Amino acid sequence: MTLTYIYSESMAVLGPLATFSEPHSYDLCDKHSARLTVPNGWSVIKQAADENQSGPSEDDLMAIADAVREVAMSSRGTSTVAPTTTSQSSVGRRGHLRAVPS
């Protein structure tokens, strides 16, 4: 779980593991998230993790793909990296993305 403090509101929010880093947020294991205590006068919001969801949704994946395409289109004129080969198989590489055969 990720613990986030909101100092201005004297509040702590405990929710599912965050996918990016934010100031005043800390990742906790199950043991420590269950034993969480806050200072007197503070409130805690605990958001249970959805155990049925095993990963990003279809909309999340499409948003990531669109963002990658947008970055690729904006940097297309700057430089391109030629495909590289490995001893096992051919792997196409362009910038920071890599297609790895299954």
Image (cartoon, grey):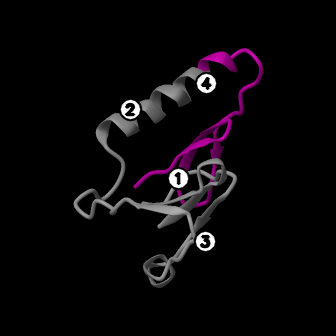
Q: Residue at x 66, y 17 (%)?
A: 74
Mark 1 or mark 2: name the one nearer the start of the chain. 1
In the rendered view, would you say 95 is above or below 21? Answer: above
Considering every residue shown, the one lying at the far front of the view is 41
Q: Which residue is mark 4?
A: 72
The answer to if 86 sits in the magenta stretch is: yes
Mark 2 or mark 4: name the one nearer the start of the chain. 2
Give the number of the mark in front: 1 or 3: 3
Spatial CA distance of label 3 from label 4 is 47 Å
Q: Residue at x 38, y 32 (%)?
A: 62
In the rendered view, would you say 85 is above or below 42? Answer: above
Q: Main secondary structure of the magenta part?
A: loop
Q: Which residue is mark 3?
A: 39
- Magenta stretch bounds: 73-102
Q: Which residue is mark 1?
A: 19
Give the number of the mark in front: 2 or 4: 2
Q: Residues within 10 Å of mark 1 (few under 14, many from 20)?
A: few
| Secondary structure under the numbered disc 4 in the rendered image | helix
